[in-house]
Amino acid sequence: MPVFPGGASALNAMSTLISEEYRKMQEELHRNPNYGVASVQYAPVVADILKQTGAPELLDYGAGKGRLGETLKTLMPNPPKIRHYDPARPEWAATPEPAPFVSCIDVLEHIEPHLLDNVLDDLHRVTHGVGFFTVHTGPAVKFLTDGRNAHLIQEPPSWWLPKFLQRFDLVVFQRMPQGFWVAVEAKRA
């Protein structure tokens, strides 16, 4: 059965972002203390962009263990208000409200391929300013309980960029040894 973040009232308003079976697998993986920690390495870049934009609030989309927010608090004398969204964490699973700055770190390669467009559309919905998104383009070292690699989508930047450009204006593209990150602004009608 699909999961509709926000409960029954959001059933008609939102598309499915994650299946219930996969949400349970992610919840299990999040019990591993070494899963969902990639955001810490990106925190200095996020802090720099936050300082440049002056955004008063950050939505950590796919927040994992919330370590991005913890790290930002050590890097910034006046960090922004930080909100979390992660469907594998019941306390953070409610449909997120838009924010002036949205980070989505080490998340998109984990999305169920048939739901990726829904998730990217939702990222567009919540990004009311700047987005900072990372994508790892190769296999993960961790595996799901059903034996699949934890990175369900392993595609190069040339596959990802058109998907971003349908929804966002590209501000920065930065390659890294295992993937890339982008800073974007949402296209508005």
Image (cartoon, rainbow, N blue to C red):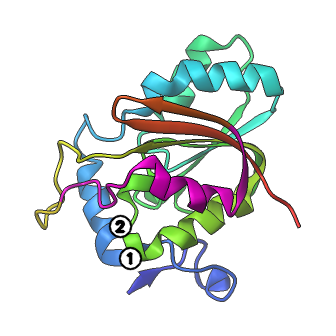
Secondary structure under the numbered disc 2 in the rendered image: helix
Say if residue 41 shows up in the picture. Answer: yes
Q: Residue furthest front?
A: 158
Judge by depth and name the residue closer to the eye, 139 or 85: 139
What's under tag 2, amino acid-wise?
A: Arg
Q: Is residue 163 shown in magenta?
A: yes
- Residue at left 66%, top 57%? 165
Neighbour tally class for label 2: few under 14, some 14-19, many 20 plus, Cα within 10 Å: some
Locate residue 41, reporting x and y percent.
43, 23
The answer to whether residue 125 is left or right of residue 110 is right
Locate residue 178, reporting x and y percent.
34, 35
- Residue at left 58%, top 80%? 15
Q: Quadrant of residue 54?
A: top right
- Residue at left 64%, top 79%? 14
Secondary structure under the numbered disc 1 in the rendered image: strand
What is the span of residues highlighted in magenta in the rendered image?
149-171
Quickly name the residue at label 2: 23
Residue 18 lies, with reference to residue 159, above or below; the image says below
| Quadrant location of the N terminus in the rendered image | bottom left
The answer to whether residue 10 is left or right of residue 74 is right
| Quadrant location of the C terminus in the rendered image | bottom right
How many callouts does the rendering have?
2
Locate residue 142, reporting x and y percent.
18, 46
Q: Spatial distance from mark 1 to mark 2, Cα to Cα?
A: 6 Å
Quickly name the residue at label 1: 19
User: Mark 1 and 2 residues: CB-CB less than 8 Å, in contact?
Assistant: yes
Badge number at residue 72: none
Q: Quadrant of residue 77?
A: top right
Residue 169 lies, with reference to residue 179, above or below; the image says below
Q: Is residue 153 shown in magenta?
A: yes
